[in-house]
Amino acid sequence: MGNNDKNRYDAIVVGTGISGGWAAKELCEKGLKTLVLERGRNVEHIKGYDDMKPNWELPHRGRITNEDRKNSPIQSGVYNYNERSKKYFVNDLDNPYIQVKPFEWARGYQVGGRSLIWGRQSYRRSDLDFEANARDGFGVDWPIRYKDIAPWYDYIEPFVGISGSYEGLPHLPDSKFQPPMEMNCVEREVAQRIKGKFADGRMIINGRTANHTLDMGEGRGRCQYKGSCGAGHACSFGAYFSSNSATLPAAARTGNMTLRPFSMVQEVYYDKEKKRATGVRVVDTETMKQYDFFAKIIFLNASTLNTAAILLNSKSEVFPNGLGNSSGHLGHNLMDMPYGMGAQGTYEGFEDKLTFGSRPTGIFVPRFRNINKSTQRKDYVRGFTYQGGAGRGRAGGGPGFGAEFKDSLKKPADHWTMSIAAWAEHLPYYENKMYLHEEKKDKYGMPVICVDCEFKENEAAMVDDMMNSAAEILEAGGLKNVKTFNRNKIPGACIHETGTARMGNDPKTSVLNRWNQMHDVPNIFITDGSAMCSSGTTPGPSITYMALTARSIDYAVKELNKRNL
């Protein structure tokens, strides 16, 4: 296809996940004719879901098969992969990548991306995060501080819909909350018991989640406590934030969005005379035909690994090592989060209490290590947080058969259990990277991604503390039979991969500036996980991607109107 009016737009957005959906919404609402490209199939809100169908109506009662494990050995290990949700995950055999070191890469290639299967935990970052690299010397200094992004958290959160409790913690800023999803009786009791027991200020608060407790309008209702989202199912009530339920419909209502699924971007074109990107080359993943599309500005939101892959594949005389890669940092500084170390125990009491429904969040323990001088550790930098919860399952598994056995399954367990597990910071190491294989290509002709990433000494130094501190919290809260655990998760398993095109003040050590604009190519912006300078200690980086996206587009459109782009 040639360069004509039919394939020319004001803006192009690559990807429809958390950040791509926000890019589409903001650009379209600001009046730009925007082409939104998605490599996977279309999924329409409600029409494309089957969350109302109970497991017993499914062929395998919701469980995965040996064939699923064979076709998707990586995806089938993700916590919410099952018979119903597997359609939102890729087939690993059709979408290969090379693990130089073990790396679990969860992927969802469809309109909405992983916003249909995300965990929805949503926590603001603070200056404890934005100043961390400068403080201890790892990585590069963030080019922004909390004051720069706070107004944009304020802007996006009412639209996202985040439930949570106001705590007034400087290192964990409050969002603009909807009412919280309250703790159950045991969680409240344990939270009350540990108050004031730890000099480092350990506390238990409500989990902060993008599940709505208020009706949002435009087909977005409040949570019904069905629990299907926790199993990776999309929500027909629109009761949790996704691109499909929220941002893409908002973009469509403007009349300015052209959404094109089955469109895999493989290269960004660059004009060396104008020193600008001009457009993208796309492969139609159904027909294998190639198309070119052109725009004044381009937002790359294809995911941390795929965004970097597109740029590394966009080589030219000016950029022989990948578009915008004069720093040599494109693809490097890859991070995830170590997680899965903690403790569990049993609680005696509240035998007359049960829970009703399925709350899509739990409790949260804010960071309490390396916050100030009194909480400073000598054996590691940064820190960790905990997620968890208490529950009372069914007795099950007892002796008997027939009616007697069936009746036993209806009875609750004779005690409550509670567990908490840590989420820790992964430092930015240059040698942790992704790159493109020089010879191997996938079936679409794109070089295969290679991932070489590991946790190192600092991450390992936290492990015992994460387990022991969890046990201390539960024991202080009155739990019995407390035992620690370590699930030994490898990089990628946390599904918080970040850092391959990081922001920074110096073009020699970073790919993007403080506006998420490429140092080398000023009309390309990147606002997905690639842009992050540090991984942080709180789960749920997506809320920060959203805020960065809105902030970046506000800047980009102003610059476009000034004819600076």
Image (tube, rainbow, N blue to C red):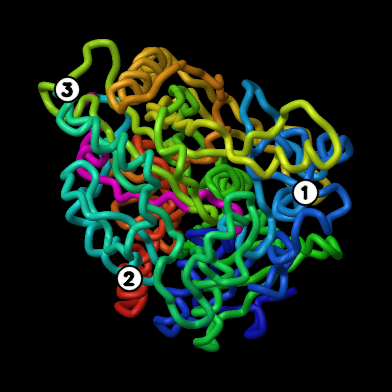
The residue to which callout 1 is attached is: 62
- Residue 459 position in % (x across, y down): 41, 19
Is 224 left or right of 284, judged from the image as shown? left
Count of all numbered marks drawn on residues in the image: 3
* Magenta-colored span: 116-136
Give the residue displayed 86% in from the left and 65% down from the top.
287
Which one is nearer the viewer's eye here, 183 or 494? 183
- Residue 65 position in % (x across, y down): 85, 39
Is 359 left or right of 536, judged from the image as shown? right
Considering every residue shown, the one lying at the far left of the view is 373
Task: Identify residue type, mark 3.
Answer: Thr
Q: Earlier in the sequence, mark 1 or mark 3?
A: 1
Find numbered disc 2 in the image and state the secondary structure of the residue it sits on.
helix
The quadrant holding residue 342 is top left
Let me know if residue 125 is in the magenta part.
yes
Asked if labels 3 and 1 touch by Cβ distance under 8 angstroms, the answer is no
Which one is nearer the viewer's eye here, 41 or 345? 345
Res 375 label: 3
**Would you say residue 359 is visible in this rendering?**
yes
Give the residue displayed 34% in from the left and 77% down from the top.
563
**Would you say residue 298 is visible in this rendering?**
no
Let me know if residue 281 is in the magenta part.
no
